[in-house]
Amino acid sequence: MKFVKFLLVGVVFGITLTKAEIISWYRIYEMFRFQSFHMYGVIGSAVVLGVIVIWFAKKTSLKGMNGDFISMPAKEKVWVRYLVGGTLFGLGWALTGACPGPIYILIGNGFTIFLVVLLSAVIGTFTYGLVRDKLPH
Amino acid sequence: MIKFLSQPWPWYVAGPIITLNMFLLLYFGRQFGVSSTLRTMCAIGGAGKVASFFKFNWRDQLWNIVFVIGGLLGGVIASQFLQNPKPIQLNKSTVAELTDLGIEDAGKDYLPESLFSWDSFSTVKGFTMLVLGGFLVGFGTRYAGGCTSGHAISGLSNLQLPSLTAVVGFFIGGLLSVHFLLPLFV
């Protein structure tokens, strides 16, 4: 039963990303060509509202359902991994038109070819795990 | 109601719902980050035997697998009950540009069938694009420690500089891809 809430939030996430066309390869292409405001509006409004919500949660010491303060762990104070890793991800994002969330949602929409993209992404993550110690971070 | 929900949802509806998703997961004591599920799947598959990066208690991450199964179900629901027969309203210059590249009927479906089908998968070009694209997504997100949900939404909401660096990377990669990589495959 404790998993039901995650399933429901996921369902809302999947319907939203489908209906707002965020799963569309064309929308991602348009975004990287700066030809539409749509994706900037989606991410921008989510972030602006997110900044307000997180600020408010911290200011009021808001607690989650298990009694802990709502917080996010700080990320490492380095930059190579974020810039290089981010760039590699960006190359793949524009090619497939899908970041990880939409990969799952596209499969649900019946685009079963994204099972290939998902499997390749798992292999990509596995490869990172293998060579991690040899990479600059 | 169904008819109303079946229209394309504007950005100012989708953005706040994504923030709500992030907040609910935080309220449940979890972090919004989809790419972590790829690492979890490696761990479930036994990758911990060959790389310490996958040696962690993946049972603690099962909630995230349930979340993406929910996402997949959301896709099923949207495609079965909330269909919209009209094409996506793309910028006319985008459509013209894609036609020049050889992609017809831009916006008719969520993605161009000429690039994303089992037929295209059986060609060298199509196979390479799908496998390379997926690989870069999986490798890049883990190297960067997050994807759009973890960095662009969660990290920026928390005003974290590393996440801004990652998002700058996403755009460097995306721009390079649409200008140089993608034309090789269409």
Image (cartoon, coloured by chain):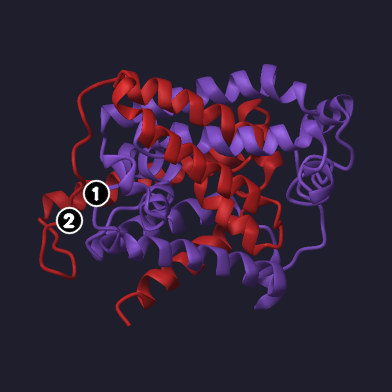
Chain colours: A red, B purple
Label 1: few (<14), some (14–19) or many (≥20) C-alpha neighbours in 10 Å: many
Q: Which residue is mark 2?
A: A70
Kind of residue at badge 2: Ile
On screen, B61 above or below A80?
below
- The answer, for residue A21, to whether it is visible in the render is no
Q: Residues under labels 1 and 2: Cα distance? A: 8 Å
| Pointer 1 with pointer 2, Cβ within 8 A | yes
Q: Judge depth for marks 1 and 2 and give the one in front.
A: 2
Q: Mark 1 vs mark 2: which is more N-terminal?
A: 1
Task: Locate residue B11, reporting x and y percent.
Answer: 56, 49
> What percent of the width, then of the height, locates residue B150?
36, 43
In this image, B1 relative to A41: left or right? Answer: right
Q: In terms of depth relative to the viewer, which is nearer, B61 or A24?
A: B61
Q: Residue at x 27, y 27 (%)?
A: B161
Which image quadrant is residue A32 in?
top right
Q: Is residue B78 above or below residue A103?
A: below
Q: Is residue A50 left or right of residue A97?
A: left
Q: Position of residue B28 (x, y in %)?
A: 25, 66
Classify mark 2: helix, strand or loop: loop
Q: Chain of mark 1?
A: A
Q: What amino acid is found at the position of numbered circle 1 in the picture?
A: Ile
Estimate how packed mark 2 is, as few (under 14), some (14 to 19) or many (20 or more) residues with alpha carbons within 10 Å. many
The vertical placement of A133 against B105, above or below, is above
Q: Which mark is residue A54?
A: 1
Q: In the rendered image, which quarter is residue A80 located in?
A: top left
> Hey, which quadrant is residue A60 in on the image?
bottom left
